[in-house]
Image (cartoon, grey):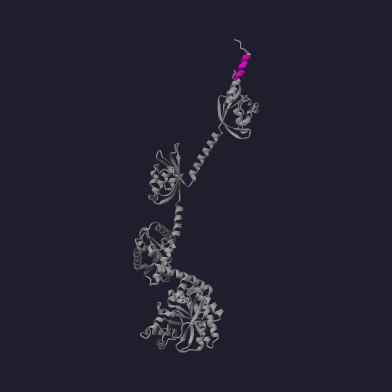
Amino acid sequence: MSADPEGRLRQAEESLRLFTSAVDTIPLGVTITDTGGKILYANAAEAAMHGYPVEELIGRDARVFSPNRLWRPMSKEQVREMRRWRRESVNVAQDGRLIHVQLTSNAVKDDAGEPIAVVTVSEEITDRKNTAEALRQSEERYEIAARVVSDGLWEWDLRSKEMTFSARWKEMLGYGAFEIGNDPEEWWSRVHPDDLDSLKMVIADHIAGLDPLFESEHRLLHRDGSYRWFAWRGLAVLNTEGIAYRLAGSLTDITARKVAEERLRQSAFYDEVTHLPNRALLVDRLTRCINRAKRRSDYEFAVVMFDLDRFKNINDSLGHSLGDQLLVAIARRLERNVRPGDTLARLGGDEFAMLLDDVGSIEDATRVAERIQHELKQSFNLAGHEVFVSASIGISSSSAGYSYERPEELLRDADTAMYRAKAGGKSRHEHFDASMHARAVSLLQMENDLRRAVERQEFEVHYQPIVSLRSGRISGFEALIRWRHPERGLVSPEDFIPLAEETGLIVPIGSWVLRESCRQMRTLASHLPEGGLLSVSVNLSAKQFRDRNLIDQIGRTLREVDFEGSRLKLEITESVIMENSEAATAMLHALRALNVQLHIDDFGTGYSSLSYLHRFPIDSLKIDRSFVSRMGADDHFVRTIVTLAHSLDMEVMAEGVETVEQLSHLRALSCDSGQGHFFSRPVPGREAYELVASGPSW
């Protein structure tokens, strides 16, 4: 049967039109090339994939799609043998962008089996390749991190109830990679009992969605039997219904940080010597008690503050090392009297405090004070030395009727009561009351006034004559300070000298008295024929005597005032010298080098260490007025002092001479000089001049 050539041509053209129409609608790229690689056809998807118009691709070499390094031309023999060829490659778009593609090619052959064209279908897989690469890189990073990171990694499958621990996780607890199984109990059983409940609560809250991240710090038992601190961080993985089915996270060893924090805490809140809470921690706990008392009308608390009597003597005689050992021994002994909830603290030096939480009454605090005294009465053995101590105790309480707002107020009031106890004879206790508060306020006001008095020079020097009992004439004066207060008038030394000692103001005050008395005595002497024989006695306080600048200050004063050192007599109490005899000896010899005279004041009332007198360069002993007042009935003690002093080439002066009978006794005992109201009360400088000028004789 003969075929219609024109009909077959129209049929072929129609088939080609339908084919191209169909191919143009599919999302895959289609390219037809001849056996030499020239593009005969490209559909719209192919052109769009590479950024070309379809018309621009027809007739071009198919290598327009491929980087030069990937182009591999095929021979006719290879095309003839081609079967379905599938591969992945990288194409280049018109703008230079690289496109990952998957290519499938087939050869089109004629009836004789000769290849006449190649049809290639291309699918862009760039996104898939990027995702796969990202996943590969992520897995690679995870693998590297897992090998080098210091953290341990863990994963908990909540469905299978199994946990997976990384080798590093196990290593951090002292185990090998295969020594710990997958049971969650491997974790729970190693958690410190005190941390377990809080850990489980944190995990439960996170799984329930209450916390966005699981974080916890707790202790785990190491293989060596010790507990190490670890920080745990994790995140729940949720299913499509929002239910957690997996937990994963990390484990970080924070033991070093916790140890450092504990050291800082110890340094900040605990005493370095006794390891008791310090002032800062006590103040913090006092603040809580004050706040609790504001919320509860039935809640009471108290502060018992105490310091050791004569602790400085223990330090000076046994050394600071044994002094510290004593503080530690006291701390350990007193800890036995601390109830749970109470706080025993060292405030500094030899000062301690006990915070009594939730006391029933003030009597409870009294009983604690009595127990402290009882405990301290038992001797302490320090490196073979038996040491006895006592304490002065002050008590302040929330039940005392005061509305305390700050912890410093309670400590202040307890301190005030403690010093009242110390002033009352030591080794006793006192409760703070309103009268103490009024006195404390008065002392504070006086301290402020005293500081201003130093700046404004509101002081005066009065002089009490010292009479030679041989000649009956004035041989010198004792300089005695007076304070002329702008409102209170003349203030007695008994009212402000102790406060000046306590605050340290005695040092500048004493320096002023020394200069002023030397200056006035120099002026007085210049107007009297016998003035050159007059001396002036100046008292040195304990703080002045310990002042490193004392020698330089006295030497400078004598030079600037042009006063002879031999006419200056420095009076020092026996107790001040005996507090540290070695240091005192050095200071006394340094003073003697200035050619000044040295007198022991109030002799017989201190240590009465007569055997030490020969060691000190002392010129005179001053008998205390208490012994002079008892003369007549008993002259024995005064006689002994006079005899002892003369045997050591020292002079003797008696103070507090009030009657002619006392004067007669002193002369009979060969006492060298006397001082007291029998001769004259202390007088201002002008009256002192008139006393000498009038030349009275006794």
Q: Residue at x 59, y 22 (%)?
A: 19
Horizontally, residue 419 falls left or right of residue 67, namely: left
Residue 458 x/y as whole percent: 52, 75
Identify the residue at the far front of this view.
Answer: 487
Task: Please give the range of residues in magenta.
Answer: 6-15
Q: Position of residue 255 (x, y in %)?
A: 44, 52
Quadrant of the image occupied by residue 605: bottom left
| Residue 7 falls within the magenta-colored stretch | yes
Query: Is 295 drawn above or below residue 637 in the view shown?
Result: above
For the residue pair 581 and 175, the one nearer the viewer reads as: 581
Is residue 384 shown to the viewer in this render? no
Residue 11 drawn at (x, y percent): 60, 16
Left or right of 443: which side holds 53?
Answer: right
Q: How many marks?
A: 0
Q: Residue at x 53, y 36 (%)?
A: 131
| Residue 280, above or below 631 | above
Q: Is residue 162 above or below residue 570?
A: above
Residue 373 placement, left or right of 500: left
Main SS, magenta region, reads: helix
Q: Quadrant of residue 615?
A: bottom left
In-front residue for pair 646/142: 646
